[in-house]
Amino acid sequence: MYQLNDFAQRADLDNALANNVAELLSNALSRNGKASLAVSGGSTPKGFFSALSNKDIDWQNVTVTLADERWVDFDSDASNTRLVHENLLKNKASAATFFNLKKEGACNQDTLAQLNTDAKENLLPLDVLILGMGEDGHTASLFPCSEQISAALALDNSDALMKVVPKTAPHERITFTYAYLVESKNIILHVCGEGKKVVLEKALANNNQQEMPIRGFLQNPDINTKVYWAE
């Protein structure tokens, strides 16, 4: 299910979300001595990243990763790894560890196997997951247009990470699968603008996950996705 948090200004959302995430990470650090955070890319989270980077928490015991990534080099404008380094892993958050989904070379079975092993041993389950949402209802790289969508959404998928090739967006992707994303202890959807509000309303009007994968987070009765939205 979901809980909507509605803000008049994006700056208000960024600050409130940063405060919430910092508290959740601090609680995980108190319980376990470590914490994990997966974020999403794009322009929407930049203000939130900046606010979070200044929070006074034990960053040296926090591991940050991405919910998904394009298989591009770090210096590419399409690299969300670069986005996170430039906007989140600075100030106090510069002490955090980054779990990089993008490796050198091709996104082949050997690379995926090693990434899956590393993620399961050192990262999962995630303490905090911040999702975004596309106009088509995709989240992470769970694209409804991809041939991999059935496997990516399958709850019995034993892979935490898999390769996805969307038909309506550029670049090969690597993404955490739905089965492992929903195991996150705290799930947040961060969206802005009237256009995304329309997409959100469409997602809430039907439960077909393959048509709009974000529905798997908004309509799953076993989880509570907190939606943060601002114009």
Image (tube, rainbow, N blue to C red):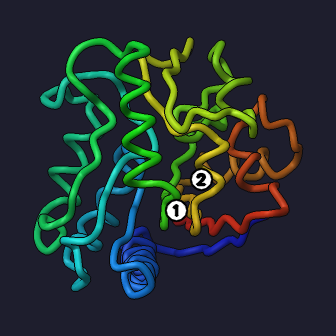
Q: Tell me which corner region of the image, top left, top right, bottom left or bottom right, holds residue 167.
A: top right
Q: CA distance from mark 1 to mark 2?
A: 6 Å
Q: Nearer the viewer, residue 222 or 1?
A: 222
Amino acid, disc 2: Glu
Q: Tell me which corner region of the image, top left, top right, bottom left or bottom right, holds residue 79.
A: top left
Is residue 86 among the parts visible in the rendering? yes
Does the residue at mark 1 contact the one at mark 2 (Cβ under 8 Å)?
yes
Q: State left or right for residue 71 relative to residue 126.
A: left
Image coords of residue 227 (percent x, y):
62, 65
Quarter of the image with the N terminus is bottom right
- Quick one: SS at disc 2? helix
At 49% from the left and 21% from the top, the residue drawn is 163
Vertical placement of residue 49 versus 83, above or below: below
Image coords of residue 218 (percent x, y):
74, 56
- Quick one: SS at disc 1? loop
Q: Which class describes the residues within 10 Å of circle 2: few (<14), some (14-19), or many (20+)?
A: few
Is residue 12 among the parts visible in the rendering? no
Amino acid, disc 1: Glu
What residue sits right under mark 2 in the picture?
194
Q: State left or right for residue 69 relative to residue 74.
A: right
Q: How many marks?
A: 2
What residue sits right under mark 1 in the picture?
231
At 39% from the left and 13% from the top, the residue drawn is 108
